[in-house]
Image: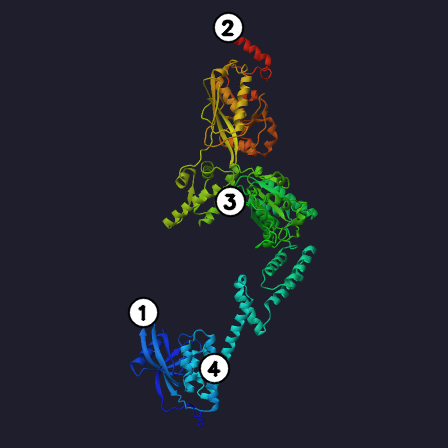
Amino acid sequence: MLDYEKNEPADIIAKERHFYPLLPLRDVVVFPNVVVPLFVGRDKSIRALEHALAHDKHIFLSTQADAKVDDPSPKDIFGFGTLGTVLQLLKLPDGTVKALIEGKERGKIENFMDKQGFFMVEVARCMETPVSSPEVEALVRSINGSFEEYAKFNNKIGKEIVSAVTSIEEPGRLADTIAGHLALRVAHKQEILEAVDLTQRLNKLYEKLSGEVDILRLEHRLRTRVKKQMEKTQKDYYLNEQIRAIQKEMGTKDDFKAELDDLQKKIKRKRLTKEAHQRVKQEFKKLKMMSPMSAEAAVVRNYIDWILDLPWFDKTKSKLEIEEAEAILEEDHYGLEKPKERIVEYLAVQRLTRKIRGPILCLVGPPGVGKTSLAKSVARATDRKFIRLSLGGVRDEAEIRGHRRTYIGAMPGKIIQYLKKARSNNPVFCLDEVDKMSTDFRGDPSAALLEVLDPEQNVAFSDHYLDLDYDLSDVFFITTANNLHNIPVPLQDRMEVIRLPGYTEYEKLNIARYFLVKKQIEQNGLGPEDISFTDKAIQTIIRTYTSEAGVRNLEREISSICRKVAKEVVKKGERGMISVKARSIAKYLGVPKYRYGRTEEKDCVGVTTGLAWTDVGGELLQTEAAIMPGKGNLVLTGKLGEVMQESAQAALSYIRSRARSLNLPDNFYEKVDIHIHVPEGAIPKDGPSAGITIATSIASALTSLPVNRDIAMTGEITLRGRVLPIGGLKEKILAAHRGGVTKVLIPSENKKDVAEIPKKILRKVELDFVEHMDDVLKEALILGEDCHLFDPEEKCEPFSFADIVQREERALASVTAH
């Protein structure tokens, strides 16, 4: 029991002053009558502990004002602290020390003395005088009650600790013990430690303890409220609700209301179409009525954000200078005259009218010819934003039109998404690989593109997610494709198709010389003084290490050579000019990968040089025919397609109908088998353009007349011997020039296509236009002086029915006479 008659305040009494080693503490305040474990890592602190242990085990504990200071000075340490006794000291493997220290009494630092790497401090002890009064008794009871309530909310304080603490009868010791168990800030604990007067200390402790209890009680009430509001599906929002409940209790501004105010300002500032503005107002009105944490509110908010982020009327100012645009296109690409001309035409018309809608171009050509990079150059030439959407593998219509908002996670289609990304309503929009789309149960994306690429409809493009009309008429759409036949006909009808047939060998040489070599030298860390390529070396790479219409593989091979040269430069440690010549190509790239198509070395019987078109350009196609005893069978090998097999049948029928003109017996086919073979049998071949080539090989084999090796040919044959037009003439003539052919026989109806062939090629390759198969045989077969085929007066007609009857009668008479 406390004696109420004695009411003497405690005071600082310097009975005697002693020097003690100082242990500065970080984020910890040690009170008297409390045992605490401390982990010490600083060298000064460890030396202070060792000094204390070596003498009387007394050490003075004082807290740093700033815990971040690693080497505190006297001004960084609080003047009040606790004099303690080191009970135990344990050195840990990581070099730190664990010390168990018991606080004894308060003390005030009077003087500092730096000794052997740690502070010795002169301490004036604070002798506490017992105080008994009704006020102290009331404070003790209130503190005990508050501490018990505090322990209910704090799971870290067990019942045993509460019982032990509340059983302390000495008020000063009780205050220090409870203060040590409270989760207070260092500054607040330091206030309690510095309160030497017992009544003042109990008041400060009760004030801090009551505040902590109120906060814990409030937290408990908030948790209970939030828990009642939560449902099973809303557990993920627990923390957000807790924050909102705290804000509501503290009276802070509601964030959701602030967001609505900001959104309303954005709606007022944004320029929208009349329909879009009305829709946004309706959705915003609904949003204000909703709970901010409901799923529907998030959907509505996301929808409004999409509408506000789209560039409804935001456009970039286009450059309309024709000369500058032409210069940029020429700088970026060699050749490609037709696409460049069409783009310049568009700019010219737009400059005159300023009302023309964006064109829709479709660039069709083999891989690597520069379709996508040409679209980028168009954007640079017109000073517009460039966006590219790859359609390869797209199967879902929603990729183009978007999903309706009824679906969870719905979003607009790629068209709207990319326009938002571009932040411009008139970009150059490249729809790459438009021929690689496919169809499944989710819809046909190519059908969805019909509206996007139709100038009459895309003024009011409707996305399923937005459900608003969006104007795409100012967008410059450029689509790219490798094969036109994979694009649906209705979609083709909406685009202006420009074919990029592939580069000639001469064009590839120039592209490599002026673009690719410079680019790869720079990318591989070399300079013009380190490496150079001769034209013959580049030509060798083109002919024997690549087989393509574009220049991608050519660039890879040049890059491979540059890497090997870079390795040599690094190994030698010095730089010097390395000239890459044709004879050194094999050293860098190994064995040639492709056989370079050349004509036969001599004139052969039954072997004719044909011309074929492939995805990577033109090719020479040797066609062989052999005659052997048999029963009139026609054997076809070389993996020929149905159309090519039918062409062979038509060629043979023509030869049979012209047997007399070729000085052949009427029944020559009855005793022989004819075998037609096209080499490189692993490669599929098809098409009607080899008709006259097959007919020439058969005629040569039957008449034993050799075919001129310097002549190549292409053309479809009919039963009457007419030569019909073919496609891919430019590529075929280039292949003939590359293979050393000096003369090419082509159908007369292909005269119109000659304009596409470079004049440089036409000066080296003679084109002979033929209308009938007889003309082909006269040019291709090497006739002797006494050999006369095809009487000029003879009509170029097949056998009549009367001729066949007469032939059969003569054959029957011969058998009867025998």
Amino acid type of disc 4? Gly
- Left/right of residue 813 with respect to residue 310 in the rendered view: left
Quote the CA–CA distance across marks 3 and 1. Answer: 65 Å
Give residue 592's position: percent from left, percent from top: 42, 36
User: Is residue 665 visible from the viewing direction of this image?
Assistant: yes
Amino acid type of disc 3? Phe
Quote the CA–CA distance across marks 4 and 1. Answer: 44 Å
Q: Nearer the viewer, mark 2 or mark 3?
A: 2
Sequence-wise, which precedes: disc 4 or disc 1? 1
| Vertical position of residue 497 compared to residue 623: above or below | below
Q: Nearer the viewer, mark 4 or mark 3?
A: 4
Amino acid type of disc 1? Pro
Image color mode: rainbow
Q: Could you tell me which secondary element the residue under label 3 belongs to?
A: helix
* Circle on res. 816: 2
Pointer 3: what residue? Answer: 515
Q: Nearer the viewer, mark 2 or mark 4?
A: 4
Front residue of 2/272: it is 2
The N terminus sits in image quarter: bottom left
Give residue 298's position: percent from left, percent from top: 59, 60
Front residue of 459/503: it is 459
Sequence-wise, which precedes: disc 2 or disc 3? 3
Amino acid type of disc 2? Thr
Quote the CA–CA distance across marks 4 and 3. Answer: 87 Å
Return the residue found at the far top.
Answer: 817
| Vertical position of residue 632 compared to residue 518: above or below | above
* Circle on res. 93: 1
Q: Nearer the viewer, mark 3 or mark 1?
A: 1
